[in-house]
Amino acid sequence: MQRASDAEIATALQTLPGWKLESGVLARALQFADFRAAFGFMTQVALLCEKQDHHPDWTNVYNRVEIRLSTHDAGGITRRDFKLAQAINEINKP
Ligand code: H2B
């Protein structure tokens, strides 16, 4: 899997509201009403990740979820990350 170029990342970000480039990975921060809502979202994303066989680095603190996407095997961002970011946005639009 080929790493995306800086130009490809910039182009992809235009169609990925809520996502930004942060320390070489795609990042999005979300806030929910409470822990139940945050964890419900994470559960939906987890099922999606299993389908795509692609998994986020993420943290949850009560009602906040921070997601970081990169392709570990490639050592950077690939189209698998763009695809997962897009699917996450379909679950939760920013
Ligand atoms: N997720 C991410 N983000 N990067 C990977 O390189 C990766 C993954 N590799 N999920 C997958 C699983 C790999 O370990 C399995 C064996 O397909």
Image (cartoon, rainbow, N blue to C red):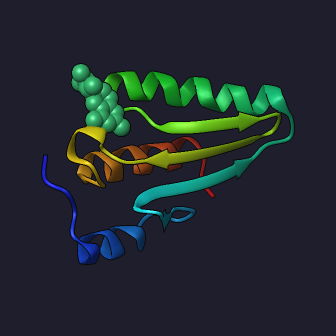
- Residue occupying the point 40% across, 62% down: 24
In terms of image quadrants, where is residue 58? top right
Q: In this view, does 31 lie to the left or right of 67?
A: right
- Residue occupying the point 82% across, 34% down: 62
Q: Residue 64: in sight, yes or no?
A: yes
Residue 50, above or below 21: above
Residue 55, above or below 72: above
Q: In this view, does 14 lie to the left or right of 9?
A: right
- Residue occupying the point 25% across, 53% down: 78
Relative depth, front residue between 85 and 72: 72
* Farthest residue, direction right: 34
Q: Residue 53: in sight, yes or no?
A: no
Q: Where is residue 69 in the image (x, y as percent from the top left)?
A: 43, 47
Q: Position of residue 85 (x, y in %)?
A: 43, 49
- Residue occupying the point 69% across, 50% down: 30
Q: Position of residue 13 (x, y in %)?
A: 41, 69
Relative depth, front residue between 61 and 23: 23
**Which image quadrant: the C terminus?**
bottom right
Ligand 1 quadrant?
Answer: top left
In terms of image quadrants, where is residue 40? top right
